Amino acid sequence: MKNEKKAEILIETIGLKKFYEVGKVWALGGVDIRIERGDFASIMGPSGCGKSTLLHMLGGVDRPSEGEVRVAGENLADLESDDLALFRREKVGIIFQSFNLLPTLTVLENVLVPVMPFSSIGGNGYREKAILLLKRFGLGEKLNNSPNELSGGQNQRVAIARALINAPDIILADEPTGQLDSRNGKEIMELLQELNGEDGVTIILVTHDEKTAGYAKRKILLRDGLVVSGGVGQAEGRKR
């Protein structure tokens, strides 16, 4: 009998809590989840349950009040500010609901924004890589257009190309179909499925929509800052 290859845990949270002084509220009350490399997980729950807060913790955008976020075994809390910025730049790509494209830049320039401070536009092959990504996503003829000349679905494809420019291990998608109609939303989710299945990119998706969550391989359900299903055990953690 062949030995099965053990799955690699890429992301793990241990007793993760977040307290906001404004409002005196625990946004996360003790969350334990594990995400394997190559996984595609959706985080669901009602508004205010802590979905986006959890996503920010996983991406190193915000620091926990208590508990740990470990990526490839490394506790993000142990990283100095410069190392944490390097982690976010090289290991994580983020896709936003509102696209967050710069209207004064072209489509191609928007994709290159994450690497502009570190190399010239034409340096290190980034320009060629950006063009290839845009062509792959059906935007090869839109390189010199501005975002306001594109549809919502096209803008989200630009945002996905931007998230991929540094070949990150992890893509974090915060309501990526929230501003799209059903057709464009379906196309974006199929594109994320392709990136996960063919490219092996680990994707964590926040959504309130059951249909959108159905594109993922697994679902993590939050309620009142706690995991009620899909985590490590059930109803992990305990609110203060």
Image: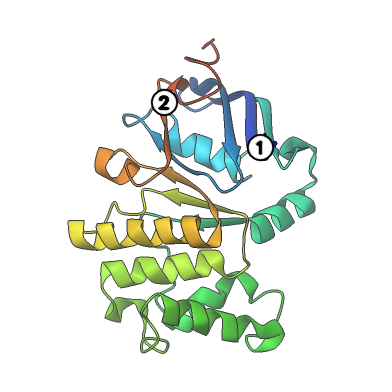
Q: Quadrant of the C terminus?
A: top right
Q: Is residue 101 visible?
A: no
Q: Position of residue 123 (x, y in %)?
A: 69, 86
Q: Is residue 182 above or below residue 119?
A: above
Q: Is residue 222 above or below residue 182?
A: above
Which residue is the extreme one toward the left?
182
Q: Nearer the viewer, mark 1 or mark 2?
A: 1
Q: Position of residue 105 (x, y in %)?
A: 45, 81
- Disc 2 element: strand
In the shown orientation, is residue 3 left or right of residue 236?
A: right
**Where on the picture, by quarter, is residue 157?**
bottom left
Q: Position of residue 64 (x, y in %)?
A: 63, 31
Q: Amino acid at mark 2?
A: Leu
Sooner in the amino-acid sequence: mark 1 or mark 2: 1
Q: Nearer the viewer, residue 182 or 6?
A: 6
Q: Is residue 75 above or below residue 94?
A: above
Q: Amino acid at mark 1?
A: Glu
Residue shown at the point (19%, 56%) measured from the top left: 182
Q: Position of residue 42 (x, y in %)?
A: 42, 40
Residue under circle 2?
222
In the shown orientation, is residue 16 left or right of residue 46?
A: right
Q: Nearer the viewer, residue 177 or 27?
A: 177
Residue under circle 1?
4
Q: Nearer the viewer, residue 146 or 164?
A: 164
Q: Quadrant of the N terminus?
A: top right
Which residue is the extreme one toward the front?
1
Residue shown at the point (44%, 66%) measured from the top left: 159
Q: Which mark is residue 156?
A: none
Q: Is residue 82 visible?
A: yes
